[in-house]
Image (cartoon, helix red, strand yellow):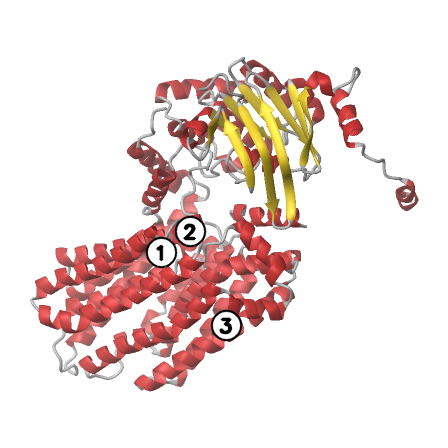
Amino acid sequence: MKRPSFFALLRFILVVKARLLFTGKNSDLLNLGRIVLVLLLIINGITIGIGYDYLIASPEIGINIDKLNISLQLMVIMTVVVSGYIPTIKPMSELFKPFYPVNNKYALILNHTVDLFRPVYIYTFISLLSFSIYSIGFSFVNLMVTLLWMYAAILTDNLVKTTIYKNLPQPYIAIALLSTIIFTIMAYFVTGLTIYQPTFLLQYVLAIVVIFVSFMALFIWSASGLEGRSPNQAVVSVNTTLKSFNTMLINLYFRRKTTVVILAIVPIIKVLILVYLYLFYYRVETGLGVTELFYSYLLMTPALIFTYIHNNLAGFFREVWLSHDLCNGDPRKLAKTYIITLLPAWIYDFTLSVFALYIIGLFAWKYIIFYITLTVIIYFLGMYASIYHPRFIDRFLSLDRMAGLKNNTSGLMSFYCGLIMLSLAIFIEMNFMLWYIPVAAILIGIFFYKSGNYSILKYEMYAELFRQRK
Amino acid sequence: MDIQSPALSLKSITKSYGDNMVLEGVDLQIETGSCYGLLGNNGAGKSTLINTIIDLTRADSGEVMVFGKKYSTSPLWIKSKIGVLPEQELLNSEFSGMEQLRFTGLLYGLEESDLLARIKALYNYFFDNENDLYKACGSYSTGMRKKLGLIAAVLHKPSMLILDEPFSGLDPLSSQAVIRFLKTYLTPERTILLSSHNLSHVEQAATHVGVLHNKKLAFSGLLSEFTVNGTNQVEQSMINLLKTDEKSTQELERLLS
């Protein structure tokens, strides 16, 4: 049999994807939404860029910091955040059915390649680029650095998810880890050569960033490495571990290895952010600026942590859903499940965040309000959205789906939440000039207020196993 | 291909989902040139058995050999020799019918010109409106999806065709078209394995039948050995074999009156 050409298949798939952009279901409306979203991303990037330049140019700042260096640090954080907001353990392009005569590795590589053309990456790149251009002036090096970071984040993200879903051996994760670290070093090496400050870089930034990224990769690695159960095993565990809410909680927080690992790493992440914040704060020798605010929000924002916990919990909740007959669609049961299982994680994360901010001297009541408002909005809107479909957790924090701008209530809700979060952050700083975000949210909401179009294959698989088990 | 080997050979296949054993020591041999109809009640394990045969599910124990080869040693060779219509979704909902078939053809290494000719011929046999070929698969009815899946399965002219519930969702005319197609497709070099609830369809298409019951093959052999003279032969034979007790309708009559 003639082996299908990689590029022939890739070309074929990309042509179909391109056609779908213009002739797919609701493509006119979706394209309008995409344009609005891209405009928003550009405006957002420009706003942050100009604001950042203003901060750096401020005479109040006595220390000379290279703008490129700082912007790069911001990009690191932004990329990490963006990457963290794509949490679903869902299959990527699943174009190759298992019974096709295609080598698994070949299919894996092609799926990866196809996935690089996902809109979320393009949107991320646009946002980073517009920030980069308007903060420090466009340069080839800056563009290359941005691309390097994007590539590292995408590769890591894809490999980790593939490893989780396909239950592949650990070398793929090792590649992700190595690539992240190598690209970190490369990016800073390029920057260091450009700005002729190698000593400074080696002493401070490089070490911190490498540690930060390594921990991030280790964190993902640990979490994903342990999440290797097959669907059958997952269903078997329903029988053995989930007898009641109490046993569910005990299993989730003490016996489920992934959760234990994540919860153990949460303080490390908080401390790393704290160290990063402290060093920056110390070096800038100024009051609260945009960057400090950004880090503070990161510290007080449970989303990053919770996306990973949710990553872990997705399978867990499916089991809960099945084992407790939540398929009946009882919202009260659902709410109870949510609250009981998430409350300890909330308290845990909140305590750590407040403690960290208190140490650094940035604690303020507005952050508490910010945190509470954020969590309430995100989780209750998520619960509301999830009532309509059992795959709620998979979906409701999935920016990935949202970025694809498919009709998806949960994705839409998560997008709303993101925008509301930003609006709140801006509102706290009383910068009314930036109220375009909620306005845009309403506009996009009008465009996409439609549910349905869910891919339910995975749920169906679980349901079938559940029925067979019965 | 090893002509001497049976098309399919299963030895002591056992499969469980947790505590629930679905297949227990199933042995089966299907000779080349036969059309084997796999029958059984709901939940008898037909789909599990077929999924095991196409390597979607790994058996807990036992051995699957297709044309004398194992998946562990020759997975791509076996997959290139079989065509599959699975029970679960095969089509990419965003692809058009034509795109789906071209994509499948590419994966089997078919030449573009040959591929298009086959698609046209097969499509025109199963469908009336050619415009539907260019619509998104997601908009297809269940029957249309089933027929398109069947076309995708036979595009590369596989030596063994494995069809899981090929008649479900099909109207009577389409079912007859599928039966005629299967009879035409079956040659001494080819083998067909199909599972179905519809006994009359199996009766028309199959040369051999197997009945899964209580996790095992309760019968496996020639159709003529299984049936008795008269109408609804397979159905009556199934009832005889499985000895289904007729449940009393007395309580129902009282409730419904």
Residue A216, image x, y percentages: 32, 65
Q: CA distance from mark 3 to mark 2?
A: 24 Å
Residue A383, image x, y percentages: 55, 64
Question: Measured along the vertical axis of the image, is residue A172 above or below residue A257?
Answer: above
Q: CA distance from mark 2 to mark 1?
A: 10 Å
Residue carrying label 2: A405
* Label drawn at residue A376: 3
Residue type, numbered disc 2: Leu
Determine whether label 3 and label 2 are within 8 Å by CB: no
User: From this viewpoint, is residue B32 visible?
Assistant: yes
- The quadrant in which the N terminus of chain A is found is top left
**Between B86 and A452, the one nearer to me in the picture:** B86
The answer to which image quadrant residue A288 occupies is bottom left
Determine whether label 2 and label 1 are within 8 Å by CB: yes
Residue carrying label 1: A37
Disc 3 is placed on an element classified as helix
Q: Which chain is home to disc 1?
A: A
Question: Measured along the vertical axis of the image, is residue A1 above or below residue A329?
Answer: above
Q: Earlier in the sequence, mark 1 or mark 3?
A: 1
Q: Which chain is home to disc 3?
A: A
The answer to which image quadrant residue A366 occupies is bottom left
